[in-house]
Image (tube, rainbow, N blue to C red):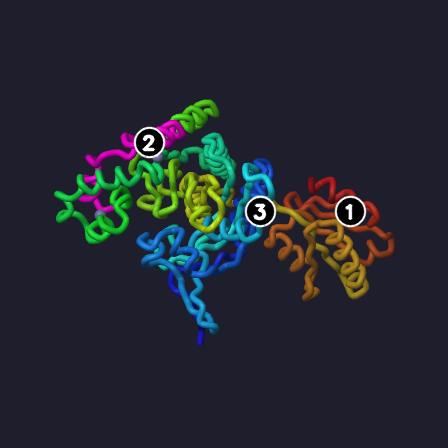
Amino acid sequence: MLYQRPRGVNDILPEEVGRWQQAEATFRDLCRVYNYEEIRTPIFEQTDLFVRTVGENTDIVSKEMYTFEDRGGRSLTLRAEGTAPTIRAYLENHLQGQDPERLVKLYYLSPIFRYDRPQAGRYRQHHQVGAEAIGSPRPEVDAEIIQLSLTFFERLGLEEVTLLLNSVGCQQCRPQYVSALQEFVQPHLHQMCEDCQRRYETNPLRLLDCKNETCRQIMQQAPSMLDMLCDECATHFDRLQQTLDLLGIDYTIDPQIVRGLDYYTKTAFEFMAPGLGAQDSIGGGGRYDELIEQCGGPPTPAVGVGIGLERVLIAQQVAGAVEEVQPRQGVFVVTIGEQAWPEGLKLLTKLRAVGLKAEIDYRQRSVRAQLRYADSEGYQWAAILGEDELKQQSVTLRDMVSGQQESLPQSELITRLQVEDE
Ligand SMILES: [Zn+2]
Ligand SMILES: [Zn+2]
């Protein structure tokens, strides 16, 4: 019986994994530069953590979580998003330390599990990179998170990413807005989609980002949160824009950006890449000044971002920012005859010990077959050991692209290859 992978999940194959590693390494390096430290939390959490933080009436909690009971009867849920587990770990491990205003900066790379209708860039296991800055209410920190994200996209060749910006207010000003929104929607509700009929009661802010065409038309006339922000939220939003201007970061204010999670306050933002159709959001985030208190910690302001790697990689393809040709590298040890074989194995070990990619033909085929194989596997060099070479303690180095060969002492081979490798 041949098994197939479950619906909605993917294998990432060796031929694709280079692009993944490149994106991950780029993100890690940026986090180092911006002084964020990596945190790795478990792949599952207590279900209640997500229900309480993300919100009972959000799409994620109400229909997308992978929830199961373990053998001890506990309800557990596979990592459904990145922020709640990070905050749980931050609190549980007292990462704030003694100084309540110290900025704690964390990042993660992690799979995320959502029971979603599979479509391009949207999988039941997808992968996110994310960063969280905990402990500061300052809009400059929101700008830092945004800048880090945009630099990440740029380094991956995504020059055309748009930043959509909004403020979703706070405990003080949002309830009033939600009432105004419901009041506006009420007379149109019968025309709106089933999801919106439900959201009207349970999660009215989500009415704003419904993808249904009729709903969108109606919501275009909806009142804007931005007109109803309290003084604190309005000042924060102004300062954020001033900071983005100062840093030369372009943005578009879009009052429809609400994100699908309950915990956002003040800043909410989303990054869009062109050419991804309905799935053009490649990441987003916002401020969550009330979440940490809600998780049982002291009131602590924080802001974060999550970026979907699958969508970033698709956007790279759309933007033509993918280097299809892998540069040749490494050295293939070619042995001729039985006597050369043990010497070949020793040379192979030495090459690998200094960090050079190196391989040998364990089938000990003909020289022609070995060279053909080295070529098809993308090696830059072949180091040939035969009877003559053994006698002279030399090696014949062949450039696999030009076919040029030269003889050099075995003792010089490694230095020579290391120079070429740079
Ligand atoms: Zn407010
Ligand atoms: Zn709708």
Is the CB atom of the residue marked by disc 2 within 8 angstroms of ligand 1's nearest atom?
A: yes
Say which residue label 2 marks: 230
> Does the stretch in magenta take in 230?
yes
Label 3: few (<14), some (14–19) or many (≥20) C-alpha neighbours in 10 Å: few
The image shows residue 239, relative to residue 216, as above or below, that is: above
| Quadrant location, the N terminus | bottom left
The image shows residue 422, relative to residue 10, as above or below, that is: above
Q: Amino acid at mark 3?
A: Leu
Q: Position of residue 118 (x, y in %)?
A: 35, 57
Q: Position of residue 36 (x, y in %)?
A: 57, 41
Instruction: Identify the mark nearer the N-term, 3 or 1.
Output: 3
Judged left or right of residue 159, residue 351 is right
Q: Residue at x 49, y 45 (%)?
A: 298
Q: Amino acid at mark 2?
A: Cys
Q: Position of residue 189 (x, y in %)?
A: 15, 47
Callout 1–callout 2 Cβ contact below 8 Å? no
Q: Give the number of the mark in front: 1 or 2.
A: 2
Say which residue label 1 marks: 414
Marks 3 and 1, how far apart at CA: 46 Å
Local SS, label 1: helix
Say which residue label 3 marks: 95
Q: Which residues are magenta?
A: 210-237
Task: Return the residue nearer the eye: 312 or 288.
Answer: 288
Callout 2–callout 3 Cβ contact below 8 Å? no
Local SS, label 3: loop
> Does the stretch in magenta take in 106?
no
Q: Residue at x 12, y 43 (%)?
A: 187
Task: Return the residue nearer the eye: 180 or 280.
Answer: 180
Marks 2 and 3, how far apart at CA: 31 Å
